[in-house]
Image: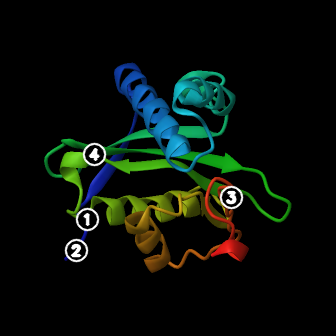
Amino acid sequence: MRPPAITLDPMSEEEFAEFIRWVVRDHALQQTRIGKWAPEDALEYAKGELMLALPKGRESQDSYLYAVRDAETGERVGSLWLMLRRRARAPETYIYNIVVDEAKRHRGYGRAMMRETVRWAREHGTATIGLHVFGHNDVARALYTSFGFRETNVLMQWDLDTEAPETR
């Protein structure tokens, strides 16, 4: 199945406000899920991290925030936050956030967004595309692997409230 055609439109103020609410909630949920933050602290930490990443909101330097739309219908299908990051060898496009709206999933929009990101990265003269993906997100990991992404580091955690290996 060929991925649908999409367009990347700069987020409007309203879309940006909705996106920020979603990103904060999702980031807090993911950080709670992996055990990094306690549920009662997660929202505040997520807000703080977002303020560091987007100190000037939509106008933050080197951040590009897009509403992703189906090219045929104009309907919004997701969002994409790309950043240009300076690296020692060459600049990098970093996918800070990529999401297909829940009702639009499993229709090829994620693949279309990745293809558009590759086009965007080349257009902006970057040498690599980087991203972070949570270990439990098997669907996203499979998509990124299918594009040729490789793991460059792996974070691991063992919870001490579980039985120690030597006692098993």
Category of crowding for the residue at label 1, using alpha-carbon neighbours closer than 10 angstroms: few (below 14), some (14–19), many (at least 20): some
Name the residue type under label 3. Answer: Glu
Q: Which residue is mark 2?
A: 2
Query: What is the spatial separation of the Cα atoms under label 4 and label 1, in whole angstroms?
Result: 12 Å
Residue 19, above or below 126:
above
- Badge 2 density bin: few <14, some 14–19, many ≥20, Cα 10 Å: few
Q: Is residue 62 left or right of residue 106?
A: right
Q: Residues within 10 Å of mark 4 (few under 14, many from 20)?
A: some
Callout 2 amino acid: Arg
Check if mark 2's residue and mark 1's residue have beta carbons within 8 Å. Answer: yes
Q: Secondary structure at mark 2?
A: loop
Task: Judge left or right: residue 150 versus residue 78.
Answer: right
Point out the tag, 2 or 4, that comes first from the N-terminus. 2
Q: Quadrant of residue 133?
A: bottom right
Please report the residue visible at 63 percent of the width from the left and 76 percent of the height from the top: 168
- The answer to whether 132 is drawn above or below residue 46 in the figure is below
Crowding at mark 3 (Cα within 10 Å: few <14, some 14-19, many 20+): many
Farthest-out residue, right:
88
Residue 151 left/right relative to 12 = right
Give the residue at x 46% y 28%. Answer: 20
**Mark 4 — residue?**
101
What is the secondary structure assignment of the residue under circle 3? Answer: strand
Q: Earlier in the sequence, mark 2 or mark 1?
A: 2
Amino acid on which the number 4 mark rests in the picture: Asp
Foreground label between 2 and 4: 4
Q: Nearer the viewer, residue 131 or 24?
A: 24
